[in-house]
Image (tube, rainbow, N blue to C red):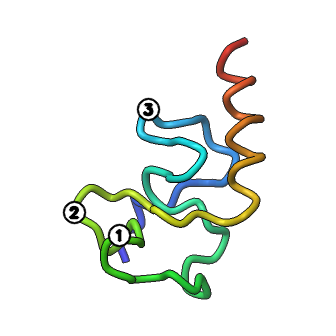
Amino acid sequence: MNKTLKVPFDAPLNELDSEVQTFGCRQKNPDICGNNSLPDVCAFATDDCICRKPSRAWKRQYEILKVQAAK
């Protein structure tokens, strides 16, 4: 597992983050993520390092971080 792809859940947004995807993995414990290492889904298994199925809590967190970034 590439540790640089592990991004804290409350870290500032990356330009590639959106409501439905994150750059890197924002799971608290990626080892127990049901999508860990799934090709074309998991940040650790895609060439572009994008997680295409973040946690259900991500959408709300994205909105919070977006507001914080606008300040």
Mark 1 or mark 2, earlier in chain: 1
Q: Are marks 2 and 3 in contact (CB under 8 Å)?
A: no
**Image quarter of the C terminus:** top right
Q: Judge whether 66 appears above or below 31 on screen.
A: above
Q: Amino acid at mark 2?
A: Asp
Mark 1 or mark 3, earlier in chain: 1
Tag shown at residue 57: none
For label 3, the residue is 15
For label 1, the residue is 2
| Percent of width and height locating residue 39 | 31, 79
Q: Residue at x 62, y 67 (%)?
A: 27
Q: Amino acid at mark 1?
A: Asn
Tag shown at residue 47: 2
Q: Judge whether 33 appears above or below 16 on screen.
A: below
- Of helix, strand and loop, which one carries label 2? loop
**Image quarter of the N terminus:** bottom left
Where is residue 56, by image quadrant? bottom right
Rate crowding at label 2 as few (under 14), some (14 to 19) or many (20 or more) other CA atoms within 10 Å.
few
Alpha carbons under labels 1 and 2: distance apart:
12 Å
- Of helix, strand and loop, which one carries label 3? loop
Q: Judge whether 57 appears above or below 60 on screen.
A: below
Number of the front mark, 1 or 2:
2
Mark 2 or mark 3, earlier in chain: 3
Q: Judge whether 2 appears above or below 26 on screen.
A: below
